[in-house]
Amino acid sequence: MEDTLFLQLHKLSAAASEETLAHVFESLWKSRKTGLKPLEKSYIQSLLNLPSAEELDPVLACLRSLIRKCLHENFIGNDILKLFPHDLPLELQSILLLLLQKYQDQWKEETSRDQGILPRLKSMTWTMENRKSKPADRVAVISLKLQDYAKSPLGETEVKFQLTKDTLEAMLRSMAYISEQLSNIAGPSSGPLQKKMRQ
């Protein structure tokens, strides 16, 4: 699916100036936590000469994916070029590559500063609701206590959410996948936890 996502880069050909694409990347980066406001979206749509918002959304998703790859997967030069469709105009490839390399260090620096103020998990508890009902109707209520260093050294936030059996199973499958990915990056980890999560 990711390969088809990068086909969206063809839609940039009509407006492929370095200045225009730099503005788009800067807007996407500034709005990484909140998303683009409708006015910003329509401005970018006009900058890129796209006929509709339906055309714009996949292009923005594609560009955000490129940003993530440069930032989190540390893609550089040839790694980035391999993502581009083979028939993407060379001039557009050069502009995109230049901009991604230009912003990569800045994005990494800003991300590392952001991480200093993210809430940290302090504790987690859970209870079961509807214990006496059928298994399909039972719900686990998860309560997370987060230490929010941005507010004050003692700032604490509580988050509660409910999970059904189906949702919990899907979440555990996702967590097992994440665990495997982390293991592949960090090397072999403790086996028993991985075995339990795969089951």
Image (tube, rainbow, N blue to C red):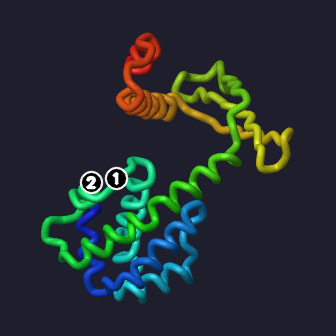
What is the quadrant of residue 24 in the picture? bottom left
State yes or no: discs 1 and 2 in contact (Cβ < 8 Å): yes
The residue lying toward the viewer, choosing from 6 and 99, is 99
Name of the residue lying farthest toward the top: 192
The residue sitting at 28% across, 70% down in the picture is: 8
The residue sitting at 58% across, 34% down in the picture is: 163
Say few, some or many: other residues with alpha carbon within 10 Å of mark 1 (under 14 / 14 to 19 / 20 or more): some
Name of the residue lying farthest toward the left: 87
Instruction: Name which residue type carries label 2.
Output: Asp
What is the quadrant of residue 179 in the picture? top left
Question: Dot 2: what SS?
Answer: helix
Task: Check the picture and name the quadrant holding the C terminus.
Answer: top left
Tally of marks: 2
Q: Is residue 28 visible?
A: yes
For label 1, the residue is: 75
Instruction: Name which residue type carries label 1.
Output: Phe
What is the quadrant of residue 25 in the picture? bottom left
